[in-house]
Image (tube, rainbow, N blue to C red):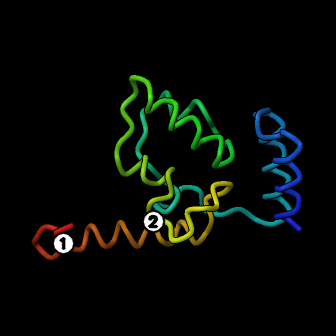
Amino acid sequence: EAVEQIDAYIENGGVEDISKYEQFCDDLNSKYGELDINDISNLTLLDAVTNRSYKNAFFPVKRRIIIERDKGAVFIPVCTKNVFLKLYSQNPSDLICWSVQDRKEYVEEIRRMLAGYIAGGMVNE
C-alpha cells in the first residue's frame, strides 16, 4: 500500500513541492513508521550548501542535484557520487529509491573497505 501511494505521488509530480513532500513523508511515517535516517547506511559526505539544498527530497531528486552540482564547481566526494550512482548496489537499475537492500550493500562496502585498515593493511582494489 505504501509503495502504491509513493508511486502515485511521484507520478503526480509531488516530488518538486518541498512542503507537500514533507507533509506526505510525515503522513507515511505516521502510518508505517520511520527508518533510522541517521544510520551510517543512509549517510554520505556533502558540503553544507548541497546538503541543505534538497532537504528531505526523494532519492531521484537528490541524485539529480548531486549530478548537476558535480558537473559544476562543487566538489562531491567520490564515495558520495558512488552512492547516488548506486555503484555499491547489486540492483542499480532502480533509481527511484534508496532501498533497505541498497543500504545493506552500502554498509557491506564500508565494512569491506575498513577491514584492511583495521587489520593493519591496505585494501588492494
Crowding around mark 2 (Cα neighbors within 10 Å: few <14, some 14 to 19, many 20+) is many
Residue, far bottom = 119
Q: Tally the numbered discs.
A: 2
Residue placed most toward the observer, 115 or 96: 96
**Identity of the residue drawn at 42% across and 48% down:** 80
Which is more N-terminal, label 1 or label 2?
2
**Identity of the residue drawn at 47% across and 54% down:** 83
Where is residue 78 drawn, in percent x and y?
Answer: 34, 46
**Identity of the residue drawn at 53% across and 57% down:** 42
Picture quadrant of residue 57: top right
Number of the label disc, if any, that sits on residue 106: 2
Of helix, strand and loop, which one carries label 1?
helix
Q: Amino acid at mark 1?
A: Gly
Of helix, strand and loop, which one carries label 2?
helix
Picture quadrant of residue 28: bottom right
Position of residue 58 relative to residue 107, above or below, is: above
Where is residue 82 drawn, in percent x and y?
Answer: 42, 53
Position of residue 7 relative to residue 121, above or below, is: above
Q: Are the residues flagged by discs 2 and 1 in contact, CB closer than 8 Å?
A: no
**Identity of the residue drawn at 63% across and 49% down:** 59
Number of the label disc, if any, that sits on residue 4: none
Left or right: residue 83 compared with residue 24: left
Residue placed most toward the observer, 10 or 121: 10
Position of residue 66 relative to residue 6, above or below, is: above
Left or right: residue 66 compared with residue 16: left
Left or right: residue 66 compared with residue 119: right
Q: Quadrant of the N terminus?
A: bottom right
Q: Amino acid at mark 2?
A: Tyr
Q: Which residue is mark 1?
A: 116
